[in-house]
Image (cartoon, grey):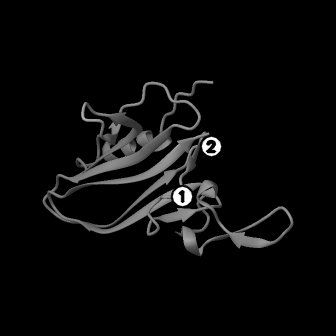
């Protein structure tokens, strides 16, 4: 089965960065991206992982979802929040940064994965797992004028 994925947040970020005719241009540029991680062996026999633009992905492929940002304005941007929903066709991997804020309930509540719990089918509370993450969020205290950066999280195609 072949799957072609898109990030819904790419359209959201484009909308946030595109001013209406009545508004001044936004000082923040945002670009969503998806990269496929692929293991390669070079001519010396050394294995490394490279990231490429995915054309087609299949279950088990590891992807990186992310957002690149740039403050092209002259003033810092204070307390900027980037939230990404996790598409149902992928599962966040256990090696997600433990300091990233996540939700396991569709964005109703947030915390670090190690702090969150879910209720299982028997009504018992247990620690949430990476595969149960529904949303990912970063809160940047400030983005300085001229600053650029990248926020990302790893997923596996279901």
- Where is residue 55 shown, x and y percent of the image? 43, 25
Q: Earlier in the sequence, mark 2 or mark 1?
A: 2
Q: Which residue occupies 44% across, 53% down?
A: 153
**Residue at the farthest front position:** 44
Q: Is residue 149 above or below residue 101?
A: above
Q: Which residue is mark 1?
A: 94
- Numbered badge on residue 88: 2
Callout 2 secondary element? loop
Is the C terminus in the top left, top right, bottom left or bottom right quadrant?
A: top right
Count of numbered marks: 2
Task: Name the spot of residue 92 as percent of width and height, x first.
Answer: 54, 52
Residue at 63%, 24% in the rendered image: 1
Is residue 12 at least partly visible in the picture? no
> For the residue carrying disc 1, how many other residues have a C-alpha within 10 Å: few (<14), some (14-19), or many (20+)?
few
Q: Position of residue 117 (x, y in %)?
A: 67, 71
User: Mark 1: which secondary structure?
Assistant: loop
What residue do we see at 34% from left, 38% from top? 51
Which residue is more in the foreground, 97 or 77? 97
Is 78 placed left or right of 4 in the picture? Answer: left
Q: Is residue 70 above or below residue 35?
A: below
Whether 59 is drawn above or below 100: the answer is above
Quarter of the image for residue 75 reads bottom left
Determine contact: label 2, label 1, CB under 8 Å. Answer: no
Specify whether 140 is left or right of 72.
right
Label 2 vs label 1, nearer the camera: 1
In front of the other: 87 or 121: 121
Disc 2 versus disc 1: distance between alpha carbons? 16 Å
Residue 78 in sight in this render: yes
Could you classify mark 2 by the number of other residues whose Cα lies within 10 Å: few (under 14), some (14-19), or many (20 or more)? few
Q: Nearer the viewer, residue 80 or 103?
A: 103
Residue 104 tag number: none
Decide: is 122 above or below 9. below
């Amino acid at each position: 089965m072949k799957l072609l994925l898109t990030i819904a947040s790419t359209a959201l970020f484009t909308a946030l960065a595109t001013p209406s005719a009545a508004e001044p241009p936004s000082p923040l540029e945002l670009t969503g991206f998806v990269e496929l991680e692929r293991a390669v062996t070079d001519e010396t026999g050394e294995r490394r992982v490279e990231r490429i633009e995915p054309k087609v992905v299949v279950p088990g492929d590891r992807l990186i979802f992310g957002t690149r940002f740039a403050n092209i304005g002259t003033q810092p941007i204070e307390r900027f929040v980037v939230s990404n929903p996790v598409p149902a066709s992928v599962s966040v991997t256990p090696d997600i940064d433990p300091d990233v804020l996540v939700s396991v309930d569709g964005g109703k509540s947030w915390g670090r994965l190690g702090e969150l719990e879910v209720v299982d089918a028997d009504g018992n509370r247990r620690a949430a797992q990476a595969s149960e993450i529904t949303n990912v969020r970063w809160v940047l205290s400030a983005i300085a004028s001229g600053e650029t950066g990248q926020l990302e999280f790893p997923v596996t195609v279901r």
